[in-house]
Amino acid sequence: MKFVPTKIEGVWIVEMERHHDERGWFARTWCSEEFRAQGLEAGLVQCSSSFNLHRGTLRGMHYQAASHEEVKVVRCTRGAIHDVALDLRADSPTWRQWVAMELTADNGLALYIPKGCAHGFQTLEDNTELSYLITKPFHPDASRAVRWNDPAFAIQWPLPDVAIMHERDRNLPDFTTD
């Protein structure tokens, strides 16, 4: 695996190293030893999937509150997404900045999202599926979110029309530091 840093400290692009032959290819998508060698958390406790029927579906920007903060490694296994990590760590030099990249089933890339960063994505194709590797169990009472189009972050989404979004995400208040 190759680990490529992004402009936000702790957010990494993870590239599979595919080994090709007449059958197709094989690649590792997870190796705790390699993640630890990069100084990244490697203690997975949960794996989840997300399936999205329609292009333009937007999920996010979600995170878990303190004491339940989680690391996520997100990979698109079918279709394509515009994946976003947003730095909400107040002591970070990149606080309130975001990084985005296209994850597709074809490119096989994953995004490593550290504790303290929110995550969201917009589907670029119908019938898109994601796989999440997560370091902490989900706690509904610790679930938090910031609005996808909050001017405090100015996240740029590739598709202007959001086809489908949960009402909870659509109606979040403006971000404040109170």
Image (cartoon, rainbow, N blue to C red):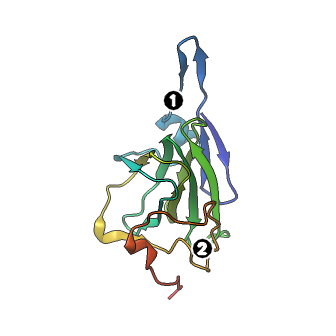
| Amino acid found under the numbered disc labelled 1 | Arg
Q: Quadrant of the N terminus?
A: top right
**Nearer to us in this view, 107 or 90:** 107
| Mark number, residue 28 | 1
Helix, strand or loop status at disc 1 = loop
Looking at the picture, how far across and down is residue 45, in whole percent? 34, 47
SS state under label 2 = loop
Q: Residues within 10 Å of mark 2 (few under 14, many from 20)?
A: few
Instruction: Indicate which disc residue 86 carries.
Output: none
Q: Which mark is residue 91?
A: 2
Q: Residue at x 58, y 46 (%)?
A: 103
Closer to the eye: label 1 or 2: 1
Q: Nearer the viewer, residue 4 or 54?
A: 54
Residue that sits furthest to the top in the current view: 22
Q: Would you say 93 lies left or right of 127 here?
A: right
Give the side of residue 144 with respect to residue 125, left or right.
left
Alpha carbon of mark 1 to alpha carbon of mark 2: how far?
Answer: 34 Å
- 126 or 51, which lies in front? 126
Mark 2: amino acid: Asp
Q: Is residue 48 above or below residue 150?
A: above
- As drawn, the residue found furthest toward the bottom would be 178
Where residue 151 sits, quadrant-wise, is bottom right
Q: Position of residue 153 (x, y in %)?
A: 62, 74
